[in-house]
Amino acid sequence: MALIANLLAGLSLLLRQPLESFCDLETTHDDAFITKRSDYVSFVRIEGIRRIPSRDDIARIATAMRIDLSGTLEERGHAIVGWYASDPDLSAVEIDRLNMTACRQAADKLGLNLADIFDERMRLWPRIMRWEAAYFILWTRPGLLTKEERKQMRDEQALLCKEIPRIGGAQKFWLRSEVMKARHDAFVGRVLSSLRAHDIGATEVDPHDALVVVREAMHRETAGSAWKPCLVGDRFMPRLPEDEDRNPTAETRLWPSLRSQIFRHDALTHGGQRVEIGQHDYAAVDMELGPEDPRPFVELAAHLGNDRIPWRGTISLQGGGKSAMALKEIAATFVSIFPGNGPLRRAFRAIRDARDTDNHISVQFRASFATWAPSGESRRLQRRAATLSQRIEAWGNCKATRLAGDPLEAVMGSVPGLSLASTGAPAQALLGDALGMLPWNRTSSPWQVGSVLFRLPHGAIWPYDPAGGSKRLQVLDLFVAPPRSGKSVLANTINLGLCLSSAVLGAQGAKLPLIGKADIGPSAEGFVRLIQEALGPERRHLAIFKTLLFAPGHEFNVFDLQVGCQYPLPLERAFLQNFLSLATLPPDTSTPFEGMTQMIGLVIDEAYRLCTDVPGGAPKGYRRGVEPAVDAAIDRYRIELHPDDPHWRDVVTALCAVGEHRLAEIAQRHAVPLLEDLISAARTDQVRDMFSKLKIQVTQEQASDLFERYIYDIIRKYPTLNSPTRLDFGSARIIVLDLAEVAPTGSAAANRQTEMMYMLARHILARNFFLKPDYLPYIPEPVRDYHRGRFEEILESVKRLDYDEWHRTQGSPLVRAQAELDMREGPKHNIQLGFSSQRLSDMGDALISQSTGRFILRAGDEREAEEIIDRFNLSDASAAVVRHGLHGPGPGGAPFFAILEVDGDRYEQKLVNSLGPIELWALSTTPGDTALRNRLYARLGFSEALARLARIFPSGSALKQIERRKADRLRGGEQGERAETGVIEELADELSDGKGIGLKLLDRSADEELAQAAE
């Protein structure tokens, strides 16, 4: 056989067939191609399966698909060709297309300088990610038509052909047939329905895009170009015939042939196994003998993905397999008397029995594969071809061959859609087994592009779009993991992606999304610092990280209003009522006293009424020197106030009238009630008359007396809540509040304080998130136009509100009720919500049931893992990931398991968040690392500090070095905390001065170490 193959190979070299001879495509008819034999061909892009499948899952789906498609593949006439390609060398082009181009454009529009981050991503990601694509090419051939239908098809073509002149080499659009199109459309619809019914993403591809796929598969160097084909119906510039052409045809006025558009170079064959096409050499591998144990395609793709070699393959299933193999079965029966042919006869009998007992039909099965390398690198090509051949043979015990009669024909057999020809040996396979071997069972992303890129464990690119949009009308994300599992870095990655997504684009130009986070500790400090540095000195105020304290400068008055208003908007009043209800509860209870909620509502109304100029009111008097900027504006605009009794409220009105709304907001802080004003409001006749008889049974106090006692206690404990606001975030769009200093734990009183601080943080961060034009009737007429623009811009903006350590609110129904209200109202206001905690049960049933994004980075123990599995009804394969596949951050990134509800579908995927050392250091939340990083920020500046840390510690952490040096100091008798501080200072000195470990900064080989660590 080898001798014959070599002779045929030599003959093919002499023939030097042109590439065009391998293309049967002739023209198009709507979404389908037509071949020169009147076959109809359609491309269906396979996004993949939405959940991680086990082998049993794949077998079950393949069986169901077999039942769906048996009728169409029973006889000759239809074919399904599964085509798949994987190319690590093309990953840079794909990463740029899916992510980097849009991210750079968004950064440019926002004025964000993230060049270091982008450059690092383009150095790292192509080394660990790979491009892949999968398609079904669906064929319908005239052989399936009845005699009458074939006659009708020929009549259609003949009639159309008569009506047109000679067209030479142009597309022969007269090959169209409505009879064939109807049969083909029915076949395509049936395949699509079967795929989608089993949660497999599939989309029929327009012929323009399909030809791009064909051309890029044929000529790898064209990948990512802007080339578009010219098809029937497209506008194009007619060609002029040559002057000496006395009898020109209509060819120059019609669409050029598809073959002339697809092929850019001819092919050269070298020996019997290597083919040169354009800038690449190709080697083909055919499946000579089908698998003994048919296995899912994803197993082959995963192994070759880890090998990181480029390859492609076509697996062809053609109807009529039973009749096609009939003669071979008869022959096998005749020769079965010889011992060596007994297995062959038994194999045919098994296929026949499957048909007789389960109506399980067989099909003709062929498979051809190819790999490639840059031209001239024959050794690399040989290694890749050997790897491909070995992997194919290990795929259920197949037999592969690299010998073909015509090496060019063998290579062309793995190009999608050109023809049904293949040098792969035909086999008879049960349809269910063959369907499982097609490339539909790889996992998929619901997004074609995304400002965040994750990867699958075997390297495939997985885009993620944090903007939500039409695919996720409600974005409610849960992050679950014990400490040091990569939870905060993942949350920061998504927030950074949100800043680079379509969320920044609006009718009023590009703006940062509105992001607020109630943090416990500095987990988001690195993210804020990164944005600040990217914005530059003049705009760093747009992103703020603030540690909340009960100290001067941190005053915040919960009674502040929208500028120009005298009373709170409904949502603001609802917050005040909830906040004061929580503040007037005993530490060990969660239910307000009877009647207290109603009284608080009336007291709030009275407190605001008393601050207005109404009978019985006492508006607050203006005093110069309190707000110098306001005083200067009054002088500048020559604002006249009442000479004897000026009021802050008059100042607000006057400043609004001259357009100084920012200064009016500052002045208004002195015109609104404070906590102490609630005492006077509670003593007014309106409140006394209504609640004088209300007595609290538990304490035997009048309700008003109990209310006053609690208000005095709040003022004593939290004096910053009883002063005009000084905690000013101005025009900031990203605000992170660290509540670690004001949110203690350990006692009922401490937990109550934590609950109040979460409620306060939510109000500080999100009080403007829920504004919308519907609230304009509540706004006074003089400032209504000003607020109309604000409300429209805020409603249009994407907003995100995150909570860290959500378990601290576990005993506070009021805080959780506010979160649940935000959850229900969020989609109407374009608000995203995120909650992080260490256990899933910390979130509460309401949030879990309504969440649309669940990110599990690790389960704390087996019980937690089983709770996650049961709560989300995970498949066996997904359950195995949660139990055994999440081990925390490592050299290749931080793995996590995502359960996403997108566009009405559910996705379950194991993904990896892979960041480069600069980005890891910028977003790090580990105390030792952040302490070292912040010291270097102060000494070297932002960019230089990150660059040095990335070169010396390319893993993104110095913890091992810190722990080793700390252990040495402890053995020397130094105290623990002092030892760690000393180590960090020591490392900071070495990195700053280029001594000690910092000597590596002078060694250029450190760059090579960084590259190896990235790989």
Image (cartoon, rainbow, N blue to C red):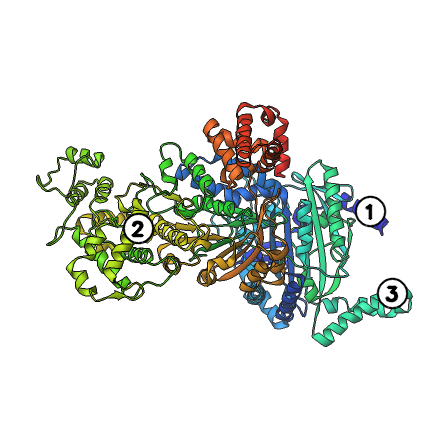
Which of discs 1 and 3 lies nearer the camera? The answer is 3
**Which quadrant: the C terminus?**
top right
Residue at which label 1 appears: 6
Please give the label number shown on residue 18.
Answer: none
Left or right of 246? Residue 599 is left
For marks 1 and 2 on the same chain, the one whose residue lies earlier in the sequence: 1
Image spot of residue 39 (x, y percent): 62, 61
Residue at which label 3 appears: 341
Element carrying mark 1: helix
Label 1 – label 2 distance at C-alpha? 93 Å
In which image quadrant can residue 444 be found? bottom right
Hey, which residue is sitting farthest front in the picture? 700
For marks 1 and 3 on the same chain, the one whose residue lies earlier in the sequence: 1
Q: How crowded is mark 2: few (under 14 residues within 10 Å), some or many (20 or more)?
A: many
Would you say residue 45 is visible in this rendering? no
Q: What residue type is labelled 3?
A: Asn
Q: Which amino acid does label 1 sit on?
A: Asn
Which residue corresponds to the image point at 53% horizontal and 46% vertical from the top-left?
453
Q: Which of 758 and 797 is in front in this view?
A: 758
Residue at which label 2 appears: 714
Image spot of residue 173 (x, y percent): 55, 56
- Using the image, determine if residue 797 lies above or below residue 867: above
